[in-house]
Amino acid sequence: MARKINDGCVACGACEGACPVGAISMGDGKFEVDASVCIDCGACEGACPTGSIEEA
């Protein structure tokens, strides 16, 4: 199951750089995870300073 980024996102970009498959990109005011690309490794979740990434 892919990860999702909730409204706590402060658009710092830490998650984007941590994703090994490039599944994260800037959306409308916050970063978003492309579920069709996400491999559910959790690297982005560990990199998020606000804890705004969770299992979808």
Image (cartoon, rainbow, N blue to C red):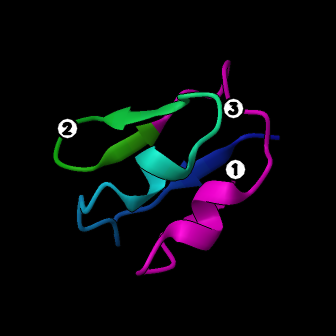
Nearer to us in this view, 50 or 14: 14
Q: Please report the bounds of the magenta region as a residue range.
A: 33-56
Residue 48 in percent (x, y) is at 48, 70
Q: Is residue 53 above or below residue 3?
A: below
> Please, which residue is most extreme toward the top here?
36
Give the quarter of the image for residue 44: bottom right
Amino acid type for the residue under numbered disc 2: Asp
Residue annotated with mark 2: 28
Q: Main SS type for the magenta part? A: loop
The Cα atoms of the two marked residues, 2 and 3, are separated by: 19 Å
Q: In this view, does 47 lie above or below 15?
A: below
The Cα atoms of the two marked residues, 1 and 3, are separated by: 11 Å
- Pointer 1 or 3: first along the chain: 3
Residue annotated with mark 1: 56
Amino acid type for the residue under numbered disc 1: Ala
Q: Is residue 40 above or below residue 36?
A: below
- Pointer 1 or 2: first along the chain: 2
Determine crowd level at label 2: few under 14, some 14-19, many 20+ residues with C-alpha closer than 10 A.
few
Residue annotated with mark 3: 38
